[in-house]
Amino acid sequence: MPLIETEEAARRLARAIASDLSLYNEEKIVKGIQEDDLFTSLAEEIEEGRALYKSRVSADLYHKNFYDRALVDILVKSKGHVKSKVW
């Protein structure tokens, strides 16, 4: 499979991976936000997604942090309704 070479496709892949993380780890995400340790409690899953993302996009696109931005948008921003000390 050829590497993804466009920013739009790289963003879509990053968001798809983050969406899968959200779908399959809802309870962990809510608990992580409540206890302010989201990225620690999901570290293994996040790194597995990061490895997949890195294997599918060109090196130039990987370094633009689309994956990290997608994690924040999907795992954090979408859970603004969850009670947390952070907000």
Image (cartoon, grey):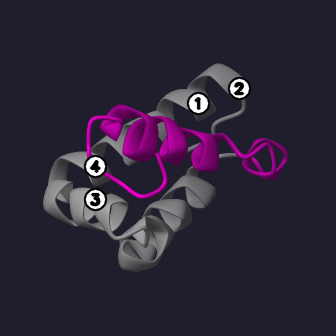
Residue, disc 3: 29
Location of residue 67 in the rendering, given as x and y in whole percent from the top left corner: 59, 47
Given the image, on which type of amino acid does mark 2 rest? Glu
Membership of 77 in magenta stretch: yes
Q: Residues within 10 Å of mark 3 (few under 14, many from 20)?
A: many
Given the image, on which type of amino acid does mark 1 rest? Arg
**How far separated are the C-alphas under marks 3 and 2?**
27 Å
Q: Residues within 10 Å of mark 2 (few under 14, many from 20)?
A: some
Q: Earlier in the sequence, mark 3 or mark 2?
A: 2
**How far separated are the C-alphas under marks 1 and 4?**
29 Å
Residue, disc 4: 83
**Which of 41 and 37 lies nearest the eye of the viewer?**
37
Q: Earlier in the sequence, mark 1 or mark 4?
A: 1
Q: Tag 1's secondary structure?
A: helix
- Residue displayed at 46% across by 78% down: 40
The disc label shown at residue 11, or none: 1
Between circles 1 and 4, the one closer to the viewer is 4
- Is mark 2 in CB contact (under 8 Å) with mark 1? yes
- Is mark 3 in CB contact (under 8 Å) with mark 2? no
Q: Tag 3's secondary structure?
A: helix
**How far separated are the C-alphas under marks 3 and 1?**
21 Å
- Residue displayed at 23% across by 56% down: 30
**Magenta segment range?**
58-87
Q: Earlier in the sequence, mark 3 or mark 1?
A: 1
Location of residue 57 in the rendering, given as x and y in whole percent from the top left corner: 65, 46
